[in-house]
């Protein structure tokens, strides 16, 4: 059931997941505290439905966060053993497909353990805020499994082949400082500041020109190409964005500040 509060539309927790829409930000909160927010099939189904409906809900940024002292303990292994198929209708597959093709920018707030899908979903995020207590692990091989969510490509690209293999094969974890140095995390903040920092970043992203944000995310997630081919990719996106009202308003605002002698900040240009 949806509850409207001023300009907010939120849903009561359903099967460990809560979803709220507020001023262009869709906030997904993992809320299965008794199991350290481990994912169930029902949570995957709810998340899949949320991801595929972001455009129709008018979301300009997705914020993923969690309640309790763990971000996500991975999959609920008891339930995971009961999975007998992985086709396009399976909730976990729907989530993985949606993450791979998502156009909406994603911000995450991580405190405590992020294990398995708790780490691999972060590889699809654009900004990741973490506390000093955050720990990141991807122990697939010790469980007789292989990496998922494109982490076999994305994690080595971010942290390097040997460190990724230590995580995959030996179950080694990255602490917050190592994750920051490796690029898995973009900011480390105090625990009391986590929610505010991540939500402020999501709100700031949501306020940016939407076409430019999505086009930039798409360009950055494309397969590697030559420098010349990359220029060819960028030019039509640049030209299309330049014609939007958002771009013209932003450029006009900067020109107005220059004309008035107002000092420009980096975010102004």
Image: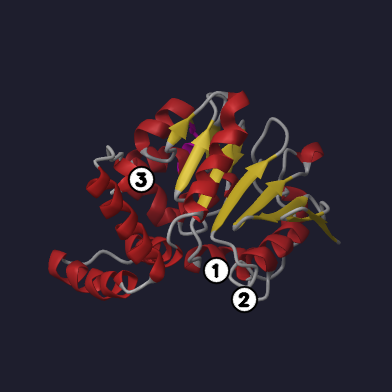
> Residue 158 — which label?
3
Q: Residues within 10 Å of mark 3 (few under 14, many from 20)?
A: some
**What is the total number of numbered labels drawn onto the structure image?**
3
**163 or 266, nearer to the observer:** 266
Determine the residue located farthest toward the front in the rendered image. Answer: 260
Mark 3, secondary structure of its residue: helix
Image location of residue 254, percent across then percent down: 30, 52
Question: What distance separates the C-alpha of mark 1 from that of mark 3?
Answer: 20 Å
Tag 3 or tag 2, which sits nearer the N-term? 2
The answer to if 156 sits in the magenta stretch is: no
Q: Residues within 10 Å of mark 2 (few under 14, many from 20)?
A: few
Cβ–Cβ below 8 Å for labels 2 and 1? Answer: yes
Question: What distance separates the C-alpha of mark 2 from that of mark 1?
Answer: 8 Å
Tag 1 or tag 2, which sits nearer the N-term? 2
The residue positioned 59% from the left and 45% from the top of the image is 118
Question: What distance separates the C-alpha of mark 2 from that of mark 3?
Answer: 28 Å
Mark 2, secondary structure of its residue: loop
Mark 1, secondary structure of its residue: helix
> Which portion, as a residue range, is magenta?
169-174
**84 or 156, nearer to the observer:** 156
Position of the N terminus by quadrant: bottom right
Image location of residue 60, percent across then percent down: 54, 60
Q: Residues within 10 Å of mark 1 (few under 14, many from 20)?
A: some
Tag 3 or tag 1, which sits nearer the N-term? 1
Check disc 1 and report the residue beneath it: 97
Check disc 2 and report the residue beneath it: 88
Residue 140 makes an appearance in the image: no
The answer to if 171 sits in the magenta stretch is: yes
Which quadrant of the figure has residue 183? top left
Determine the residue located farthest toward the left in the rendered image. Answer: 228
């Amino acid at each position: 059931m949806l509850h409207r509060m001023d300009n907010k539309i939120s849903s009561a927790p359903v099967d460990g997941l809560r979803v709220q829409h507020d001023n262009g930000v869709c906030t997904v909160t993992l809320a299965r505290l008794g199991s350290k927010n481990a994912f169930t099939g029902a949570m995957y189904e709810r998340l899949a439905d949320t991801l595929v409906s972001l455009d129709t809900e008018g979301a300009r940024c997705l914020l993923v966060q969690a309640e309790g002292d763990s971000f996500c303990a991975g999959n609920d292994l008891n339930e995971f053993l009961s999975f007998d198929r992985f086709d396009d209708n399976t909730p976990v597959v729907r989530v993985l497909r949606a993450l791979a093709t998502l156009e909406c920018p994603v911000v995450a707030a991580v405190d405590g353990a992020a294990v398995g899908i708790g780490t691999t979903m972060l590889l699809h995020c654009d900004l990741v805020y973490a506390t000093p207590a955050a720990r990141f692990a991807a122990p697939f091989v010790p469980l007789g499994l292989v990496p998922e969510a494109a982490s076999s490509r994305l994690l080595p690209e971010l942290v390097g082949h040997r460190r990724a293999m230590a995580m995959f094969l030996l179950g080694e974890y990255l602490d917050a400082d190592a994750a920051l140095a490796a690029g898995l995390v973009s900011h480390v903040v105090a625990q009391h500041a986590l929610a505010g920092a991540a939500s402020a970043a999501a709100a700031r992203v949501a306020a940016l020109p939407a076409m430019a944000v999505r086009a930039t995310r798409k360009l950055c997630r494309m397969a590697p190409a030559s420098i010349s081919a990359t220029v060819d990719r960028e030019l039509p996106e640049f030209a299309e964005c330049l014609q939007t009202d958002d771009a013209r308003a932003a450029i006009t605002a900067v020109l107005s500040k220059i004309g008035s002698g107002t000092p420009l900040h980096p975010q102004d240009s």
